[in-house]
Amino acid sequence: MELLCSSAKYRVPTQFTVNKTLDKDDLLMLRSLTRLLRKNMWAASKPSQTKKDSTGGPLSKNVKVNETLIKQSFGNSSDLVVRELRVGPGGRFTVLVVYVDGLVDKTLISENLIERISDQTAKWCNPEQAYDDLKNRIIAVSDVKETGDLDNFLNHVARGDCGLIINDVAKALVADTRGWAQRKIEEPTTEATIRGAKEGFVETLRTNTSLLRRRVKHPRLRIEEHEIGTISKTSVAIAYISGLADEKVVQEVRNRLGRINVDSIQESGQIEELIEDAPFSPFPTILRTERPDKVAGALFEGRIAILTDGTPFALIVPATFTMFLTSPEDYFERTFMASAVRAIRYLSFFTSLTLPSLYVAVTTFHQEMLPTPLILNIASQREGVPFPAVVEALLMEVLFEILREAGVRLPRIVGPAVSIIGGLVIGEAAMRAGLVSPIMVVVVAATGIASFATPVFSVAIGARLLRFIMVLLAGSIGFFGIVAGLFALATHLTSLRSFGVPFMEPIAPAVVSQFKDLLARVPWWAMHTRPALVGHKDLVRQGYDQKPKPPASSGKDTHR
């Protein structure tokens, strides 16, 4: 039998001699082998982007050769600045200053590099002496590195560093002179709170790590930086507290980031999709946030944060379902108010998921479950509506989602006004035209408002998508369809894992010690331990004698 494996450029015949009739297992094996051969041949035929763009090799001792290679590598870009300085006795030595305009602090380069180098009158005997003098005495920049590799030198310059090359020395100095324009620290737009910190992450990685350092003032805070993207060279940092985070989970994060092989990373959402446990689940298994206080709180529990240069959103792993329904405000307000608001939030999530389907099931199959005056009122409102309840619900939900998306995409000044006015106009017009009933408009509006109470957008949108499936199930077999849908959803959620931690913990598996921070939150003085499955390296977070103890009354008014 002849197996032909073809690709864009290759067609390789491979001979297999078979002396028996192929059974099902043999056919499956051959099919797997065919896919493997095609995959390997496609990978071999695809040119390596890294090799194609790489100049490679060590730096030359000839400064003119280095200058030519640098300009060719950057394609003679207009923002590349290459300046030649003549220093030493009679201008004997040539120093090449290389940087990218817009990524550096020009004042720092002028005063601490060019001016100090130009003013030198030292009588250097050889280029090595001049190189050492530049490195150890002249360059007035805090972080100076040396490299002998051209690729490494180019990468540093592309990041915003300033490179210095001296003639007759096959090494270069790289000074940290980064100083590009950046957005100032502001209040997060997606996670606003009434009480708590009013500063959020920005698009600069080093600023974000400093925000974490300000909240975790301890040397046990570890920040490991990785580079992802063969072209973009995006800096990605892993942050955790040594002794609290499980080293196995930290290593798993390192491994998953190390397996990423893409051309570019522009946002943490790309990393999230490349390392998550359940890519086809409607619910995320990695928590994202732009609040430094939320990340710091997760680090104190033994979790790990992933910060990406170029985006204000950080990723937190391992994540559990309950984390997506909590807000930083829950831990800053007093326990009774925080617990009440959290309970409302859980109720709102369940409402946004099931309210339209409950209405469809009751009006279609289970009219006897409502009081007679109420069902007669609903029936009178639906009189003349040409669609069944399930079509009516789907129609209104689709219109509501279109209005919500339009409000998000429009300019910020007119977006809210258009979404509100559009909802009122379309709802009123649909009722007057007899396309929908007034009660359906109320149900859809209540569902939309309930969905806004979910703190994390990615979970809210998952509930919005599942809402359509629940409506279809309710329109097919009533309450039995709703129960089957909820049972399937619960089964799916309990099967999920986030970096080895059950997604529904502490509900499934039940961890009784963590019920103190589930539906309600106990006072801070009673939260003695960290989450058991995450912070097991050091469970105790505070002493057991933190309960306030006001002085006993002596029977006399001491302030009289």
Image: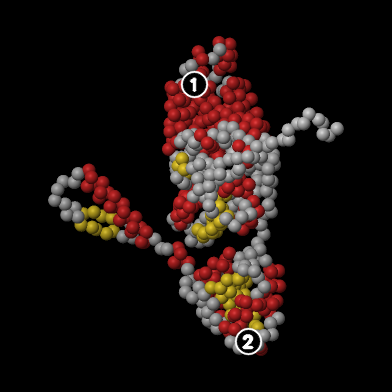
Residue 246, horizontal then vertical, whole percent: 49, 50
Residue 352, horizontal then vertical, whole percent: 56, 30
Q: Label 1's element?
A: helix
The amino acid type of the residue labelled 1 equals: Ala
Q: Count residues near mark 1 (Cα–Cα under 10 Å), then give few for <14, some for 14-19, many for 20+.
A: many
Q: Quadrant of the C terminus?
A: top right
* Res. 284 visible in picture: no
**Above-or-below relation of 275 to 69:** above
Q: Nearer the viewer, residue 283 or 415?
A: 283
Q: Residue tagged by mark 1?
A: 361
Q: Nearer the viewer, residue 335 or 548?
A: 548
Q: Residue tagged by mark 2?
A: 124
**Above-or-below relation of 84 to 16:** below
* Residue at the limit of the structure toward the front, as seen here: 554
Residue 340 placement, left or right of 233: right
> Which residue does the image show at 78% across and 29% down from the upper left?
555
> Which residue does the image show at 58% across and 55% down from the upper left?
221
Q: Nearer the viewer, residue 284 or 464?
A: 284
Q: Count residues near mark 2 (Cα–Cα under 10 Å), then give few for <14, some for 14-19, many for 20+.
A: some
Colouring mode (rainbow / by chain / secondary structure / one colour) = secondary structure
Residue 162, horizontal then vertical, whole percent: 61, 70
Q: Are marks 2 and 1 in contact (CB under 8 Å)?
A: no
> Which residue does the image show at 54% across and 67% down from the upper left?
155
Residue 534, horizontal then vertical, whole percent: 50, 44
The amino acid type of the residue labelled 2 equals: Trp
- Mark closer to the chain start, 2 or 1: 2
Q: Label 2's element?
A: loop
